[in-house]
Image (cartoon, grey):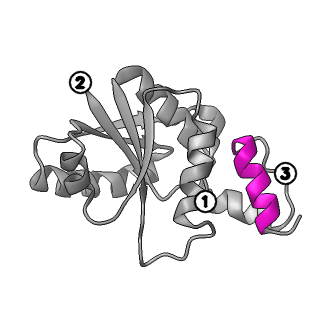
Amino acid sequence: MKIAVCPGSFDPLTNGHVDIINRAAMVFDKVIVAVLHNPNKKPLFTMEEREKMIKESLENLPNVEVESFSGLLVDYARQRGACAIVRGLRAVSDFEIELMQASVNRKLAPEVETIYMMTSNDFSFLSSSVVKEVASFNGDVTCMVPKVVAKKLAEKFGK
């Protein structure tokens, strides 16, 4: 069984993330959406809220699981029996950061391959930061995020 890990903070999940996860689910037998707990960041949503939103948004994908983790991504990938880490690229600027990360991961776990997927053009401008900023000013994010996420953002920002 070919297992892939799609890691991220997903604070919040965007349609760009969903695009990459959907496409990874067509390539791999099982995809684990791994929600990173990063103690250095102050997320808008709790880990539990993020996991719940992701599960609801991806419930139509039977070969996708959602879990949280902390620590090294390659250690988590090994523990879950993953052969690949799937990452999305929006622009050339993403590649520089991703290249460094993939190089370190290859040194630590050469048996775990990093696979890049280009985000669909419709979502190349999207980031969780952009979504949060638009939502904080009462902007319409319904074309940027799944319905459940749009609803939770409205609740968070009191709209």
Q: Which of the two labelled residues, at mark 2 and mark 1, occupies the earlier sequence position?
A: 2
Q: Which residue lies under the disc numbered 3?
A: 140
The single residue placed furthest to the top in the displayed view is 26
* Drawn side of residue 128 relative to residue 67, left or right: right
Q: Nearer the viewer, residue 136 or 102?
A: 136
Query: Which residue position is annotated with label 2?
Result: 1
Q: Is residue 3 left or right of residue 111?
A: right
Q: Please tell me whether mark 3 sits on a helix, a strand or a loop.
A: loop
Q: Residue at x 23, y 24 (%)?
A: 1
Q: Secondary structure at mark 1?
A: helix
Q: Is residue 59 magenta?
A: no
Label 2, secondary structure: give it. loop
Quarter placement of the C terminus:
bottom right
Report how far apart the C-alphas of labels 3 and 2 lie in the structure: 41 Å
Q: Quadrant of residue 111?
A: top left
Q: Compared to 133, does 123 lie above or below?
A: above
Q: CA distance from mark 2 to mark 1?
A: 30 Å
Question: Which quadrant of the figure has residue 112?
Answer: top left
**Amino acid type indicated by mark 2:** Met
Three-letter amino acid code of the residue under disc 1: Glu
Q: Position of residue 38 (x, y in %)?
A: 41, 70
Residue type at mark 3? Asp
Q: Residues within 10 Å of mark 1 (few under 14, many from 20)?
A: some
Query: Which of pointers 3 and 2 lies earlier in the amino acid sequence?
Result: 2
Of badges 1 and 3, the one in the foreground is: 1
Residue 120's place in the image compared with 10, above or below, is above
Q: Which residues are magenta?
A: 144-156
Residue under pointer 1: 49
